[in-house]
Amino acid sequence: MKNILLAAILFLSGAAAAQKDTLAKYSISELLDKSIPDISNSKIYAEELLHRNPSDSIKIRALDIISDYYILTAGDFDSANSYFKKSLALAKKINYTEYIIICLSRLSTYHAVLNKNEEALKYLSELKQYRFIEDYNTYGHEGYVYFLMGDIEKTIFFDKKMLREAKNAAKEKGMTKKKHEEIQLTIKAAYAGIATSYNYLKKLDSASFYINKAEEIKIEANNVTWFIKAFNLILRRDFDGAIACMDKNYDKYIKNYKIDKYQYLYYMAICYQQKGDFKKGLEFSKEAIENKTPMISFQNYELECYKIAAECAEKLGKTDEAFLYNKK
């Protein structure tokens, strides 16, 4: 047994050394480039960057990569926050304003996700001392933080301020086509955000009004309204309408986007559960659980999927399976 353990230790040590030798052949810029598409190994690349004792600006980017790794692979916001705090300290040390803003934005967001509202508001207050390029971005982020904290009325207040400021900016003369499209996307996002908030307040007609306003803006981008419209239809108990809405958008806006796919599976599970088709409800909820994706939201999608799976399994007489999902 001791020989097996020793062999395993030697193997792992050798593998680690081989990996270190492999990473050594990459330059700093190559490591940064590799870390972006390869999220599963991004932490390894970032740690190699830090091991080389690079400039403070590179250290900040490496810490940022590790933070993203913890969120995207495990939904571990506590670990992410610890690295963003290190990034923030370094950014302040070298007066790197762009990254100070990024760190404060994310720290305010991720503390809100963790229901650490006092800390979230502290970082939000500090963030407001720095000017975003446009005021509407400031209001948009402020509304987002309050949304994550569950304060929907304040979210609507700031999203409407964002909408007003973006509309004023759109009236400016002589802007580039790119800038015009950027502002139109902001206006569309504001409409969508307000619609989302009205959905949560069960003011469904108001939500529909803003969904329609968002859909009037014909900008080619990932559709930000399909899931808001589907949720609105679910709340109206128009489950067939919600399914049709999602099916219509699936190929173009859902299947190739991980977060959208996860929301789609969750909403489909709700629809079929509520329609009494427990077989399909179980299939979609199980697929959602298997493809769970960290979501920046005050709503616990994973827990809801387990509840749906447990109920559907119970209705189908699959008591052992229902017990398994209830334990989660």
Image (tube, helix red, strand yellow):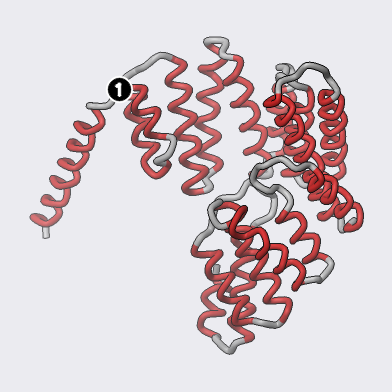
Quadrant location of residue 252? Answer: bottom right
Quadrant location of residue 309? Answer: bottom right
Residue furthest to the left:
3
**Relative to 157, 144 lies left or right:** left
Whether residue 259 is situated above or below residue 247 in the rendered picture = above
Residue furthest to the top:
94
Looking at the rendered structure, the secondary structure element under dot 1 is loop
**Residue 42 appears in the figure:** yes
What's the residue at 81%, 71% (across, down)?
237
Quadrant location of residue 2? Answer: bottom left
Query: Which three-letter amino acid code belongs to the residue tagged 1?
Result: Ser
Return the x and y of residue 308 as percentages of the image width and height: 64, 72
**Relative to 64, 326 lies left or right:** right
**Residue 151 appears in the figure:** no
Return the x and y of residue 141 as percentages of the image width and height: 73, 33
Return the x and y of residue 239 as percentages of the image width and height: 76, 72
As rendered, which of 34 and 278 lies closer to the eye?
A: 34
Whether residue 99 is situated above or below residue 237 in the rendered picture = above
As rendered, which of 78 and 105 lies closer to the eye?
A: 105
Q: Label 1, on which residue?
A: 27
